Every structure is written in C-alpha cells, then in structure tokens.
Amino acid sequence: MRNDHYPDLPIDPDSPSPDRPLHRQPWAMALVFIGGVFGTLLRYGVGELVAPSGGWPVGTLSVNIVGAFILGALLEALTRSGPDAGNRQRIRLLVGTGLCGSLTTYSTFATEIALLGRDGQLAVAISYAVITVIGGAIATLAGIALGALRARA
C-alpha cells in the first residue's frame, strides 16, 4: 500500500493493492509458469531427439542458441512496438521469461562442460563453452536485427 505522506518510500511488496510489483502478481506468475512448462517440454524433447555427436552436447547447444535468438527477436520487437504494458508485457512474460527461460539451460551447459573435462575431453569442453557463448551472442544479435526489421514492417 502506498503511503502518500512519504512518496519517496517504496511500495510495500506485501501489500494486496494493485500497486504491488509485477513479479508478485498472480497473473504474471501464471504466465511465466505456463511458458516455462512449454519451454521445459521443448528442451526435453530436443534432448531426447538429438543425441550427442562426437562428445558434443548438440541438444543443449541447439536449445541455447535458438533460445537466445528467439529472446533477442522478441524483446527487440516488443520494445520497438511500445511500452512494456498490456499484451506486450504478457507476451514478454509468457514467451520471453517463461518459454525462453526454461528452454535455455545454463545448468545443463555447465554440467556438460564439467563432465567433458572430467572425462578427459578438455578440448571439446573448451570449444563447446566458447562456441556456446559466442554462438549465443551472435544468435541474440541476429534476433535483435530480425526484431528490428519486423518492427519496421
């Protein structure tokens, strides 16, 4: 609840008022959850369909690169189309935070690097790490470029 006598103080996060922060709104949490379910199912499906090749965890690499691309395109297009409110905010929460957040996986990426190193495949571990980080950055930039083009159209 906002205290108008002290406007410089933050809003009480435990307040039941509509002024509570977005991350504490039940509808926002539900959108992230729903997107997360689908992202997790996609990541699991890719992991089942795409076997490691030559020691390379191709499935994890693929979902991380694709997720970075989608997130770059989505956020750029949404940002260029107006303020983070209404349907744009709902799409960002559902697809950006929920779907892309659960589709991509840092924990599996880190575990796979550690396991490759443990198994004596140090060159594969290092190249996998470098390619994932650089590939993710390139995919994000490509997504941003696409999102910018799409927003202009």
Image (cartoon, helix red, strand yellow):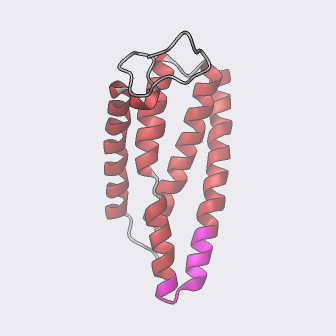
Give the residue at x 41% y 40%.
98
Q: Could you tell me how many numbered marks the image carries? A: 0
Among the 4 quarters of the image, the one containing residue 146: top right
* Rendered view: 59 above or below 136: below
Give the residue at x 41% y 15%.
18
* Rendered view: 127 above or below 121: above
> Does the segment drawn in magenta span residue 35?
no
Q: Which of 122 and 11 is in front in this view?
A: 11
The span shown in magenta is 117-129
Judged by its main secondary structure, the magenta piece is helix
Image location (x, y in percent) of residue 34: 32, 36
Q: Nearer the viewer, residue 25 or 51?
A: 25
Q: Quadrant of the N terminus?
A: top left
Q: In which quarter of the image is the C terminus?
A: top right
Image location (x, y in percent) of residue 129: 59, 69
Give the residue at x 52% y 18%.
85
Among the 4 quarters of the image, the one containing residue 31: top left
Q: Which residue extends farthest top?
A: 4
Image location (x, y in percent) of residue 97: 46, 39
Is residue 125 shown to the viewer in this render?
Answer: yes
In the displayed structure, does residue 61 sit left or right of residue 83? left
Image location (x, y in percent) of residue 48: 31, 63
* Rendered view: 113 above or below 77: below
Among the 4 quarters of the image, the one containing residue 90: top left
* Rendered view: 3 above or below 152: above
Q: Which residue extends farthest front?
A: 5
Is residue 55 shown to the viewer in this render?
Answer: no
